[in-house]
Image (cartoon, grey):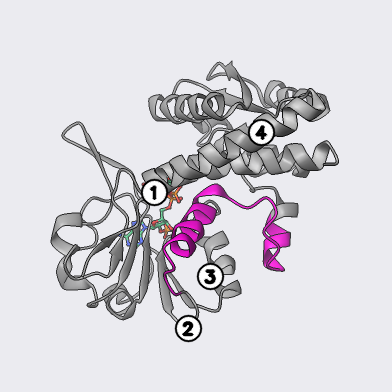
Amino acid sequence: MGKVLDGKLLSQKLNLELKEKVLLISKKTGVKPKLAGILVGNNPASELYLNIKRRTCSEVGIDSLLVNLEKETSKETLLNEIKRFNEDNSVHGIILQLPLPKELKDSTNEFIEKISPQKDVDGLHPFNRGKLFDYKEDLVPCTPKGIISLLEHYNVEIKGKYAVIINRSNLVGKPLVFMLLKRNATVSICHTSTVNINEFIKKADLLIVAVGQPNFITKEKIKEGVVILDVGTNRVNGKTCGDVDYEGVFDKCSWITPNPGGVGPMTVSFLLQNTFYAYKNQMNL
Ligand SMILES: NC(=O)c1ccc[n+]([C@@H]2O[C@H](COP(=O)([O-])OP(=O)(O)OC[C@H]3O[C@@H](n4cnc5c(N)ncnc54)[C@H](OP(=O)(O)O)[C@@H]3O)[C@@H](O)[C@H]2O)c1
């Protein structure tokens, strides 16, 4: 056993397909899709993520622009930037790179609520979150969408399976619950207050780990034949790794995402897919 859910390969395929669609439609309309990013401060990881997103945009023919506000930016200035992009018809998608600096962090939800739901390509606005509650997957967060896409592409059965998600954030765990329920999995969410977490992990058919701790999942903890999606991003000795001891668990699981090269590139792909979706809606296509 041990088969790789290759997110790098699948994302390349999806990006190529998207590139063709973008070229075709923007030739017809004379308007290219455009993504606007807002970065507050100079968190190196955030800068890196935004650069990757913008580079991939340019590879598929989506225009992008970035506003980098200084760390000491006031609430009012940030709200004005969001308003400006909401009102700019040439911008179809807006991302506010998180986390915000600590002075603004407590107001994160307030900022997100000000982004036009039609341009909310991170799928974090309450309107889009509410739709997901009704199983409508229009603009949903990109990481869960990437995870579902990987499972579906490789024909990994979701229906009837017991899925355990270790993460309860708005970005990963919470939206994934609805997406897995929609596909008839039985779902548990675990977090830092879960008692006897290893009992949940041991029973999982599908295990989604987004903790941010290297080697959080090891061979002894998992069931034979489990499918593992390793979302966590960590740096160890200058190298990127996930939350799972990949080599250790490989023979025991039936499917697994490498990390890097699994969920990460799929997340970027679905940001572009969401931007294209938002563009088509705003252009009435
Ligand atoms: N590859 C990608 O595209 C991608 C996308 C998004 C995120 N990520 C990565 O995924 C990880 C999570 O991201 P996030 O934004 O969701 O972070 P987050 O909001 O900090 O969420 C971490 C979650 O893990 C839980 N957790 C932490 N330590 C735990 C432990 N010892 N036992 C059980 N649960 C534990 C937390 O529980 P509590 O809620 O109780 O604190 C929380 O629900 C990070 O490493 C991030 O870099 C990767």
**Quadrant hosting residue 256:** bottom left
Q: Is residue 282 above or below residue 91?
A: below
Residue beneath disc 4: 22
Percent x, y of residue 235 = 25, 37
The residue lying furthest to the right in this view is 284
Q: On the rendered image, what quadrant is the N terminus found in?
A: bottom left
**How far is disc 4 from disc 2 in space, using C-alphas?**
37 Å
Determine the residue positioned at 61% across, 35% down: 20
Whether residue 92 is visible to the viewer of this picture, yes or no, is no
Percent x, y of residue 276 = 67, 39
Percent x, y of residue 145 = 54, 55
Residue type at mark 2 is Gly
Residue beneath disc 1: 7
**How far is disc 1 from disc 3 in space, using C-alphas?**
19 Å
Residue type at mark 4 is Val
SS at mark 1 in the image: helix
Determine the residue positioned at 23% across, 50% down: 214
**Callout in the foreground (2, 1):** 1
**How far is disc 2 from disc 1 in space, using C-alphas?**
24 Å
| Direction from residue 211 to residue 102 in the image, left or right | right
Determine the residue positioned at 70% across, 32% down: 24
Whether residue 261 is visible to the viewer of this picture, yes or no, is yes
**How far is disc 4 from disc 3 in space, using C-alphas?**
29 Å
Q: Is mark 2 within 8 Å of ligand 1?
A: no
Percent x, y of residue 260 = 30, 43
Residue 160 tag number: 2
Residue beneath disc 3: 180
Residue type at mark 1 is Gly
